[in-house]
Image (spheres, coloured by chain):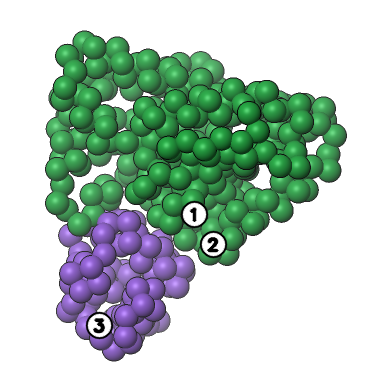
Chain colours: A green, B purple
Amino acid sequence: MKAFTGAMLRWEWRDRVLELTLDHEPANEIGLAALGELEKFITALDALSPDTSACIFASAQRRGFSAGADLRELYRLAAVMPEKEFHTGAREFLERMHRVMNAIDAAPVVTIAAVHGVCFGGGFELALACDIIVADKMARFAFPELRLGLIPGWGGIPRLKRDLGNAFIRDLLLTGRSVSAARAHAVGLVAQLAAEGESLRVARATAEQIRKFDPGARAAAKKFVKPIPCEELRREIEIFCELLRQPAVMAGLKKFVESTDAMPYLP
Amino acid sequence: MRTLEQTTKEVLELASRHFNVQPGSLTPEDDFFKKLGIDSLQALELLTRLENHFGIELPDYEMQGVSDFRTLADRIQTRL
């Protein structure tokens, strides 16, 4: 499928470049509906790969790339579902999300995240699955999961560990703080810095460069430099599911959903 | 080294520019959430502008509970 428009996202293939645009208010929160459309997307990505050089992930929402998992949906489901069913459902959701992230991570085309604004939690994990992160100077990255009594669950830690030094990861994860694009660039998380509002244009220019290379050499190079941390990804699912059973999580979700705090996104 | 007064002045100028309000209409004592009518994500935008302008990192947990420009400037001052 060369073009698709769903409720959460859309994509379009043109001149060997596939462009996926997250577009759901307020800040591309990712829940069941977005997961379903991402699954459709990875099927399309697989089918289009032989004729595709690069794939760009971007957002049409002003507030940013993505604020991460849809915590309101998670809280709503936890409130209405029997406990056992909820936890089974949560594990299934994680397994499905990992399949999506792993497919993006291992895609034979070059994947580029064009980031602006907030890139938090699950949104950050989606960017981390990509080969190259281009960020505009107003972008911010964070893993605020610890404030909910959780760890990132969609591959965040194993992928960060693959790419970066542990001291920075500990600071990011254990304080839950957000870091600017400039800092993310300085530590090597962001590959290219763009001027404000220009991340997509820079990502397109990067895709244009990638189009020049032989597909076989490109795919071999990617496979060589970007192994999938399978074992750690499996372990992450187990730790996440274990933590999800702790009462602190529902208390944290309740606090977030019902918060009248002016800054509920801040840890 | 900037003084707290200079830092406060620059914070006010930057906030006026970013949120498109009349220069001089903000004061150090103003509650920026109320005065500018901003939410948490817009506060993060302001934080990014401030970090880029002053060339510092200000962890967002240090902004927790801060709502007036003078205290914000004081937090920035500790990182200059």
Callouts 2 and 3 on one subunit: no
Q: Are marks 2 and 1 in contact (CB under 8 Å)?
A: yes
**SS class, disc 3:** loop
Structural distance between the alpha carbons of marks 2 and 3: 27 Å
Amino acid beneath label 1 = His
Name the subunit of mark 1.
A
- Where's residue A242, x and y in %? 28, 17
Which residue does the image show at 26% across and 59% down from the upper left? B39
Q: Sequence order check: which comes first, mark 2 or mark 1? A: 1
**Alpha-carbon neighbours of circle 2 within 10 Å: few (<14), some, or many (≥20)?**
some
Q: Indicate the amino acid at tag 3.
A: Leu
Is residue B28 or residue B34 the one in the foreground? Answer: B34
Q: Name the residue under label 3.
A: B26
Residue A197, numbered circle: 2
The quadrant in which residue A201 appears is bottom right
Q: Quadrant of residue A237?
A: top left
* Percent x, y of residue B44: 34, 59
- The residue to which callout 1 is attached is A116
Task: Say which residue appears at 20% left-offset and 29% top-offset.
Answer: A76
User: Residue A116's x, y, as percent?
Assistant: 49, 54
* Three-letter code for the amino acid on which mark 2 is drawn: Gly
